[in-house]
Image (spheres, helix red, strand yellow):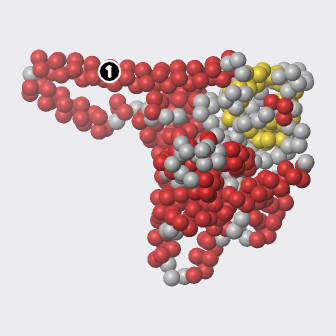
Amino acid sequence: MPRIGKPDVGTLSLDDIRLVREMANGQSSALSQFYDRWAGDVYAVCIAIVRLEQDAEEIVEEVFWQAWNQASRFDAARGQVRQWITNIARSRALDRLKSVKRRREESLDAAPLAIMADPVNASDDLILAERASQVTQALLALPQAQREVVEMAYYGGLSQAEIAQSTGEPLGTIKTRTRLGMQKLRECMGESKEAHA
Amino acid sequence: MNNLHARSSMNHDDAFAELGALALGALDAETSKNVEAHANSCPVCTSELRALREALSELPATPPEFSFNSSHSSDIRSRLVSRAQETRTPSRTSTPWRTLAMAASLALAALGFGYARERAKRTEVEGLYTQRLAESQELRALVADKESRIAAITGPSVAVMEMSATGINAPTARMFWDRATNRWTVFAHGLAQPKAGRAYELWLVTADKKIPAGVFKPSKDGSAVFAATYALRPEDLKAIAVTDEPEAGVSAPTGSMILLGSAAGS
């Protein structure tokens, strides 16, 4: 899927392959450079899936540590570095989500659940919305359930089936949320064009 | 409409309902193929899919309600590098290898030097083969990457735009826009290293908006190669620009202008 705003296929891949090779050879400076290059993308995948900043940051560290330890296994002929590192991030984030879900199910305390269910409060949303572009505002204005599905797919790279599995919601519900959420983003785009016409 | 859809196994209403998920890349492979097959033959769905993708392209690089705390990010980097330095022990001198080597020597001695020589040779050849195979795979990937880049800057549909700045030692850049594939490739030189937590962001400027095309950082020598894919009508592009922004990227420019190029005559 072409996505503007993020480096895509081929971008800086020569440097990336060199860095991974240096990591495999034990050069910690390469790990530092590699982190600077990919931390933003990895964080976007993690936060879109786990929705909690502290968890996402812990996973980012785990992801790069795994990359450091498994750099010698990276096969440049089988895929791009971006795909490799975001696959690790996705897998780690899904593992964390499963464990969080287990903890939620085991807990009888309702208050932490409410906090976990809505990490951003309404006033934060308003401040963010004022600063953001119209489409971003439309995303922030979506009901939380729809916004989560759109973000898990767009930033987290998850399929609808994976989202259903990881959230425990029926696939039909996820499909409906996707459709409604995307319709609203699309409508916002239309309104934006009409306003500029 | 029915004739147009004859080649697709999915009807219009079903395909239309899945366009959002297709734009997000959230469909399974088979459904994705069927929806795309329909969309390719249906002007309504083609237009809707383009609009959905355009809407997604406006989103920032990180979910808007979250941002990666740059101080936390620096801490994570420091911890990773420290751990990496602590564990960086050349494998040849590690205890398990020494133990294994001693055990192997004893075993080989027991089996006889002739056998040992043959086995060593075989191990050496296997090692060389594995190494050459890995190098070959790496080279194939590099060649494919270079071919892709050459195609993106040499095709008949490629427009070239110069980007420049004022001042001594000012950076320069050249943008190659392949209109047939919607591929944008920038080669830049002389860029200063951005400050911690900052990066360069590329913008495609039209009459009514500035489209964020991604963030990048230069190599140590100040050069950078950056590519993105975005569909834009040739007449819509007015300028291209690079600004200094937070490394997660922003949806509208906020930082200082680093490079600017006009689309006139492109």
Q: Quadrant of the N terminus of chain A?
A: top right
Q: In this view of the protein, which residue sits in the foreground, B116 or B215?
A: B215
In the image, B49: left or right of B100?
right
Residue drawn 70% across the image and 59% down it: A183
**In the structure shown, which secondary structural element does the residue marked by tag 1 occupy?**
helix
Point out residue B188 in the picture as x, y percentages from the top left corner: 75, 24
How many marks overall?
A: 1
Q: In this view of the protein, which residue sits in the foreground, A134 or B72?
A: A134
Residue drawn 64% across the image and 45% down it: B42
Which residue in the rendered view is the most extreme toward the front?
B3
Q: In this view of the protein, which residue sits in the foreground, B22 or B58?
A: B22
User: What chain does badge 1 belong to?
Assistant: B
Residue drawn 35% across the image and 30% down it: B92
Where A186 falls versus B137 (above or below)? below
Amino acid type shown at disc 1: Tyr
Residue indicated by mark 1: B129
Point out residue B131 in the picture as x, y percentages from the top left corner: 37, 23
In the image, B168: left or right of B27?
right
Residue drawn 73% across the image and 70% down it: A121
Q: Is residue B201 visible?
A: yes
